[in-house]
Amino acid sequence: MEILKRISAYKAESDKLAWTGTFKEYLELLKEDPTPAMTAHARVYEMIKSYGVEEENGRKSYKFFEQEIFGLDRALEKLVEEYFHSAARRLDVRKRILLLMGPVSGGKSTLVTMLKRGLEQFARTEQGAVYAIKGCPMHEDPLHLIPNELRAEAEKELGVRIEGNLCPSCQMRLRTEFEGDIENVLVERVFISEENRVGIGTFSPSDPKSQDIADLTGSIDFSTITEFGSESDPRAYRFDGELNKANRGLMEFQEMLKCDEKFLWNLLSLTQEGNFKAGRFALISADELIIAHTNETEYKAFIANKKNEALQSRMIVMPVPYNLKVSEEEKIYAKLISQSDMKHIHIAPHALRSAAIFSILTRLKETKKQGMDLIKKMRMYDGEEVEGYKEADLKEMQNEYLEEGMSGIDPRYVINRISSALIKQNLQFISALDVLRALKEGLDQHPSITKEERERYLNFISIARKEYDALAKKEVQKAFVYSFEESARTLFENYLDNIEAYCNWSKIRDPLTGEEMDPDERLMRSIEEQIGVSENAKKAFREEILIRISSYSRKGKKFDYASHDRLREAIEKKLFNDLKDIVKITTSTKTPDEKQLKRMNEVINRLVEEHGYTPVSANELL
């Protein structure tokens, strides 16, 4: 079986990556490449960078996030540059807890999970290799073996920085096992792994009465006290708390602000000084990135409590809002559905887009910009051009409300409603109307929305329906026009003849009678009006077409039906309007004749081949 071969290859690769040597050999390795000595913060930053960075219009996007997190480019850029990059350069932000704060189902947990999985994979590469003192319960940095008095000299020679001290366990082993002979202490390559509790720790709050601080800092092993005689003997202590195991990597605090205060006090020293108190030992050094997440309500309650000021000053709060782009919201739903067992059910085109339009509208705030409504704003946010507005207007709107995207309908609700539509019996596909109907029905059962919000949300469902109608109509229109492609080309040529005569102040000749006539103004305007070309703008539009024809001619290219998008759209709309009675009769006839049936089949085939419908969903659309 292929999977067994892959497992075997994976094990062979792990064996190949394994390395064990003395501290002396490790120093030789560092002389050639100092990257294994980087801090946990630097390791996370380098891991993100290793996937690639794209820069466009002065904004950076990180490929590491693009498969899982959608529409949060601005928030992610701020997170990487203002926290990870700065912390990697040993600036003071590395001494802060990273607190991701945002609404439910906004991607905070996904983001942390991605960082953990990314670190695990990065540690298996040459660039992300991590080395530790062999047998250390905290995967200690081997450079901590160098005495403080000699560190400045070692740093100069190796080109690295050394921070922190040996854990109590390694101090004792150095005295007893190696008799102070640092050179021969064994070092091994370790692989960051949440499952094996190497370099990743996770703490989740539970009942404060039963949860013990030992979950974070380790505990005394009472069964060994009689053997070793003292609670301050490192051999009688389990260094197995989440803070111990997260050393050299990442520590996640789930719903951090729900934790009892005593669990958070340990973080004061850990963030600022890089150490924490455990058992009857001196402060224990730890190099780990602390990342927590919470919702806005919990955060507001936390900052309102004056007792939390010390911890609050040691936090970098990064807002993680909802996505505000329709096209990115579609990707979120598609990803969640693909992870389910319902992916075999066909989702008709625009079904997810309709749901996304509804969701985004609930998250947007009305702008003060004159003439800009929510629909236009939604389109501009999604990268579409809106007549009369520029890039500067978009940036102004994005900076208008700091809290935009922190409220509204969450993706989980939408997916729950899509799921309810998907599990109906004998369903071959779901359409946009099925999804919008499910969303509407769900509003009655939604526990946390007010009557006013419900009315507003119902209006957004109506808007989403209108947007869907426009998209569906356009597709059907194009599919029908294709059936009359010869008619479209004739109309196109006719229009070109007329505008050429108009711009050159000449006449056109009737192909049948040979009679000379004035350009057909009525025909030209009936086409131009389809795409909103005003009476004042008609001359400029016609001249633009002629200039384009001339440009094509100079390059030896033929100007045809597909050469000008706006003109093609105008021709299609004009033709469709002329043919709409034929279309209506064709689609509504219960017993179509042979000609009508042929046309219907042509349209259905076009919808299937070019727009992603199935024959059944295309037929229902018609």
Image (cartoon, rainbow, N blue to C red):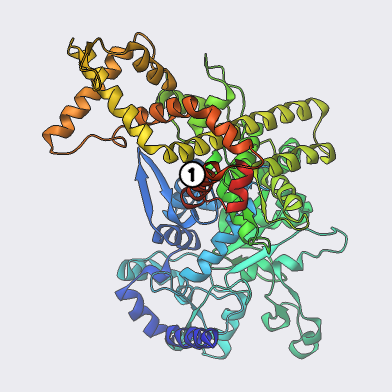
Residue furthest out toward the right: 209
Query: Where the N terminus falls, by quadrant?
Result: bottom right
Q: Is residue 20 above or below residue 605?
A: below
Residue count near mark 1 (Cα–Cα under 10 Å), binned few <14, some 14–19, many ≥20: some
Q: Residue 393: image x %, image y %?
A: 45, 23
Left or right, 513 with respect to 78, comes to: left
Residue located 58% across and 53% down the image? 615
Nearer the observer, 233 or 462: 462
In this rendering, position of residue 618 left or right of residue 231: left
Q: Residue furthest front?
A: 513
Query: Where does label 1 land, which residue?
Result: 73
Camera-nearest residue between 441 and 393: 441
Residue at left 64%, top 55%? 109
Q: Is residue 163 visible?
A: yes
- Rendered residue at 43%/83% (across/down): 17
Q: Position of residue 23 (x, y in %)?
A: 42, 83
- The number of discs equals 1
Residue pictured at 75% horizontal, 82% vertical: 230
Q: Secondary structure at mark 1?
A: helix
**Residue 30 image-quadrant placement:** bottom left
Task: Kindly identify the amino acid type of the residue bearing the numbered disc 1.
Answer: Asp
Quadrant including the C terminus = top right
**Quick check: can you spot residue 97?**
no
Between 91 and 494, the residue placed more toward the observer is 494
Residue 383: x and y in percent read 45, 35
Q: Position of residue 461 (x, y in %)?
A: 69, 32
Q: Quadrant of residue 433?
A: top right
Q: Quadrant of residue 537?
A: top left
